[in-house]
Amino acid sequence: MSASSPLIAHPVPTAIPQHLIVDFDVYNPTSDAEHFHQAFVDFQRATKSPLVWTAHHGGHWIAVGGRDVYNLYADHERFSSRHYFVPATPEQGTLGAFTLDPPDHGPFRAFLNTGMSPKIVTSKIPLVRQLAIDLAERAAGRGGCDFLAEFADVLALTVFLGLVDLPFSDREKLGALVEMAARDPDPEHRIGGIGKIAEYLLPYINQRRAHPGDDLLSHAVNADIGGRQITLEEAIGASIHLMGAGLDTVSSLFSFVILFLARNPEFRRRLIENPDLIPTAATELIRRFPVVVMVRQVRADMEYLGVDLRKGEMVAIPTAFYNLDPSIYERPMDVDLNRGAGKVLTFGNGPHRCPGSILGRNELVIGLQEWLKRIPNFSVAPGATISVVGGTVAKILSLPLVW
Ligand code: HEM
């Protein structure tokens, strides 16, 4: 699930030392998709303190150093996952594993691991491949398309709907609701979007509780939570999150990757001439184009990285700060197929690390294989400006391509 917030700058609390105050919007560092990642790199390079405060989005801390950000993802003892966007709103309900801390997190995580096991993901591969082939073939003859609307979003949505066994015909309706819950500039509308997803899901949840299948939604809504059945409210929360997490992230990452390939014909040619390189390239592209900015909430007053933090304050932890930190990766902005697989933060770290990472990676690899086979030479439509809308998951909303 993702969220963006309006560009409201709030007054800075008097206790924050002046030298730690910055003017940086973690969700919207720039609206120019081509410079989105560079904006994080520039901020990191220019920032001397490991922890700084910004007045955007209700006011919150930002962890800046790659290693600190990496560690913070896993540090549930000091930082809670209760809120998943800034500003933290009291109305935000719980969303299963996503907003629970260990030990409560465990049982809600178990059914995600079962429902997205490597075996289940492997069983979905023929569907992903056939869908990628159909979509690429349909686009190929037309000389151009919007990569999001006609390929990436359709691929991600359909694969996800197959995983939870919901009707493919609801794709557009659900896509619009997720968009609202994820990126509406008004936090109240985002909460409203979540409510609408709940309304949509309720009949399916009731049906799967009465007649469970082997799909991920059935696993979620019949989960055993420490010896009792998951409650209806918990089941709704867990399903809503799955919806957002599965629908948005893959197409978001994919759109940055295709934009890169459109702008770098030499690199693209390497992949077309050596398709065996695509899985290796996917690993490096997943590092190079992180899209998630999570937040955590300080659990108790403490000193952290030399700064006094107060219980309840929020800390933003952009995944780009690890993947693109030059002290972790040499020349981090280069896409280099010789790097070898190192740790990356694209899918998070610690107990909340993404259970959909294998599926997401497979969608990227298969999507690239089938797209490049049919549409090897493409570029961004002349005159198009490619904008990104930031949030928990940053997303390019439209990517017009021609070939
Ligand atoms: C390229 C695609 C994806 C990216 C970049 C991504 C990224 C992430 C990240 C960074 C987290 C950690 C959140 C945290 O630490 O608070 C996460 C968690 C999660 N992701 Fe993904 N994800 C992707 C695909 C998917 C897919 C396809 C699904 C499901 C079908 C999914 C389901 C989830 C769930 C349920 C969680 C919460 C797990 C927990 O809290 O224990 N993700 N994802």
Image (tube, helix red, strand yellow):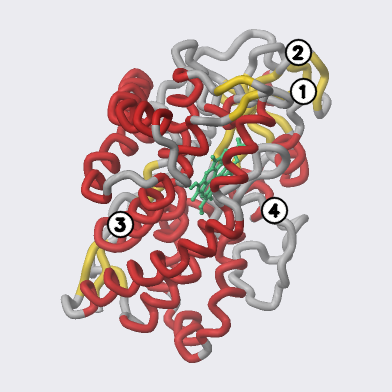
Residue that appears at 33% across and 33% down: 204
Looking at the image, tell me whether mark 4 or mark 3 is earlier in sequence order: 3
Question: Which secondary structure lies at badge 2?
Answer: loop
Task: Identify the secondary structure beneath mark 3.
Answer: helix
Check residue 78 in the rendering and tell me which mark sits there, or answer none. Answer: 1
Q: CA distance from mark 2 to mark 3?
A: 43 Å
From the viewer's perspective, is residue 172 above or below residue 200? below
Q: Nearer the viewer, mark 1 or mark 4?
A: 1
Residue 325, numbered label? 4
Q: Dividing the image into four quarters, tell me where ligand 1 lies.
A: top right
Q: Identify the residue at the far left of this view.
A: 142
Q: Is 51 placed above or below 159 here? A: above
- Most foreground residue, 24 or 232: 232
Percent coordinates x, y for residue 167 in the rendering: 27, 46
Dot 1 alpha-carbon crowd within 10 angstroms: few under 14, some 14 to 19, many 20 or more: some
**Alpha-carbon distance for marks 1 and 3?**
39 Å
> Is the C-beta separation of discs 2 and 3 under 8 Å?
no
Label 1–label 2 contact, CB within 8 A: yes
Callout 3 amino acid: Val
Please tell me whether mark 2 or mark 4 is closer to you in this view: 2
Residue that badge 2 annotates: 300
The secondary element bearing badge 1 is classed as loop
